[in-house]
Image: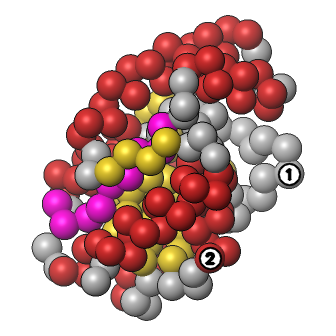
Amino acid sequence: MSDLYSKLVVVSGPSGAGKDTVVAKLLEKDSDISLSVSATTRAPRGSEQNGVEYYFLSVEDFLAKAENDGFIEHAQYGSNYYGTLKSDVEERLADGKTVVLVIEVQGAANIKKMYPQSLSIFIMPPSLEVLENRLRGRKTESEADIQKRLGIAAEEMKKSVDYDFTVVNDALEDAVNDAYNIIKNHNK
């Protein structure tokens, strides 16, 4: 494996922990940090746009890409598929960027096995109660989906010990600064 992959940063955390918000702030803070846009089979939420937040694919298209080695990792999460496009990551790394992958726990474990020199950061909510309030505040999921996500979150939070670093997202600015300092110190 190339040393190039030392500039690969995996960010995970339960749904509602604020990982996407933390990463968005990192991108604003430093133009050398680039976000790998994941592919998913889930429907867009709100004003999400194809190719910006995610590449929204049909299940058939997603599975065809998986068959043809088009992902560096992919997994099923709930009833949807998520994956990281190999071409997207390799292009950004070749351009000298620090590439951030926002992926779920199963995919993160696969990335760490494939690219052990990558950096992994788990974004932790301050508590399950805060997490539940955040999920309910979105008003995008049914009660059944919220309960399912909370169950998944409890299991994911146990896996935070497998990450290089854990950042608690209690105060957004502090979480962003903590994650930024971790990334910058890793790439020295």
- Residue under the point 65% across and 63% down: 24
Q: Which residue is mark 1?
A: 47
Query: In which image quadrant can residue 161 be found?
Result: top left
Closest to the observer: 72 or 140?
140
- The residue carrying pointer 2 sits among few (fewer than 14), some (14 to 19) or many (20 or more) residues within 10 Å by Cα, namely few
The correct choice, above or below, for 12 with respect to 1 in the image is: above
Q: Is residue 34 left or right of residue 74?
A: right
Please report whichever mark, 1 or 2, sits nearer to the chain's N-terminal start: 2
Q: How far across and how far down the image is residue 9, in percent?
A: 37, 64
| In the image, farthest residue toward the bottom | 95
For the record, the magenta segment spans: 116-124
Residue type, numbered disc 1: Ser
Q: Is residue 15 at least partly visible in the picture?
A: yes
Quadrant placement of the N terminus: bottom left
The relative height of residue 181 versus residue 76 in the rendered view (above or below) is: below
Circle 2: residue type: Lys
Question: What numbered label is drawn on residue 29?
Answer: 2
Give the class, few, some or many, for how many residues have Cα within 10 Å of label 1's Cα (few <14, many ≥20). Answer: few
Front: mark 1 or 2? 2
Taking the view exactly as shown, the residue that stands out farthest to the left is: 1
Quarter of the figure with the C terminus: bottom left
Is the Cβ of the residue at disc 1 closer than 8 Å to that at disc 2?
no
- The x, y position of residue 158, in whole percent, is 33, 25
Q: Residue at x 32, y 74 (%)?
A: 185
- In percent of the image, x 78 and y 53: which residue is there? 48
SS at mark 1? Answer: loop
Identified at 43% across, 69% down, the residue is: 181
What secondary structure is the stretch in magenta mostly built from? Answer: strand
